[in-house]
Image (spheres, rainbow, N blue to C red):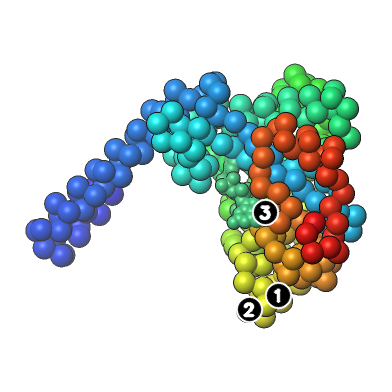
Amino acid sequence: NADLAMFRSKSEGRNNYHFYVAEMDAEVQARKIIERDLRLALGTEQLELHYQPLVEVTTGEIVGCEALLRWRHPTRGWVGPAEFIPIAERTDLIAPLGRWILHRACLQGRDWARDGLPPLKIAVNLSPAQFKHHQTLLAMVSDILDQTGFPAEQLQLEITEGIAMQNIEATIEVLQQLREMGAVISIDDFGTGYSSLNYLKRFPVDKLKIDRSFVADIGRHADNAAVVKAIVNLGHSIGARVNVEGIETREQLDFIIAHGVDEAQGYYFSRPVPPDEFARLVREKSPYCMTCETP
Ligand code: C2E
Ligand code: MG
Ligand code: MG
Ligand code: MG
């Protein structure tokens, strides 16, 4: 990046040089501070997982949840995962963080079962950096399942299209092994990346999660409707279930019901909530009414 600034300084004049360097410095500094604070946060109560319901479209039942990382920073308040996970990924922090997330989610699942909740699927996001070391990843998943006793069949691992389409042959093999352990593989934010459909049919994939951008402006963009329809058909044709995330309105829900989507997730049902609140939702709220004005 320093080279880039130098290059720009030559082509755009001297004054810009100082500007770019100052701006980059500030950015690098901010990143370093987050990195330092995150290192301190690991293993403390600053980090928590919240859980957002996965709702079966035909029945309105909560069939599971997605675990989403939350960081309560001591001075900055809540910091969103989109802000700090990319930083963790560029450092050695992603390994312990990723392990902590999976461990915490599996422990939670086991505790819910002990508390008498019905078997719930728990979806955990894997980051691209975790996917670089295949053997480490496989060993981690299998260790954690052993340690916690959480049933592999209830574990769903979410990867992005970017991960899936990198190093395709090796990825197919790892996914197959994860699946042999019993885990379910989902492709997250589907439709935003560059999946090769040729490869997709060879992928051991159980679920496609359509990115919420495709339902964000339903009613105004007919082409998005066509994309959703196409992805549902595609998913079903390879034997995968289809989820749509980011359902916020009745209109969006009607739309995905009409298009044969299997599973829904979004603020319309619930925001991601702390574990006790999620347990309460499962006990008291289920199933959602899929035809009512308010669910
Ligand atoms: P994602 O895996 O696609 O997660 C869905 C995101 O959409 C979550 O944001 C969730 O809170 C948000 N969301 C759910 N329903 C709605 C809705 O109706 N409207 C809107 N506007 N948003 C909705 P969040 O929790 O901020 O996470 C952002 C991203 O950060 C995640 O996207 C995922 O890529 C990453 N992330 C979160 N937790 C973890 C984690 O534990 N590990 C890894 N590797 N990545 C994580
Ligand atoms: Mg996800
Ligand atoms: Mg997603
Ligand atoms: Mg997303």
What label sits on residue 267 in the rendered view? 3
State which tag comes first along the sequence, 2 or 3.
2
Mark 2 surroundings within 10 Å by alpha-carbon count, few (fewer than 14), some (14 through 19), many (20 or more) = few
* Tally of numbered tags: 3
Q: Secondary structure at mark 1?
A: helix
Badge 2 residue CB within 8 Å of ligand 1: no
* Element under disc 3: loop
Q: Earlier in the sequence, mark 3 or mark 1?
A: 1
> Is ligand 1 closer than 8 angstroms to the Cβ of mark 3?
yes
- Residue type, numbered disc 1: Ala
Q: Residue at x 16, y 65 (%)?
A: 11
**Contact (Cβ within 8 Å) of mark 3 with mark 1:** no
Residue underneath mark 1: 225
Q: Is residue 18 left or right of residue 49?
A: left
Say what amino acid the circle numbered 3 marks.
Answer: Tyr
Return the x and y of residue 132 as percentages of the image width and height: 57, 39
**Residue at image point 61% right, 26% down:** 100
Q: Do residues under tags 2 and 1 come within 8 Å of each other at their CB atoms? A: yes
Between the residue at mark 2 and the residue at mark 1, the CA separation in whole angstroms equals: 7 Å
**Which mark lies nearer to you, 2 or 3?**
3
**Number of the label disc, if any, that sits on residue 221:** 2
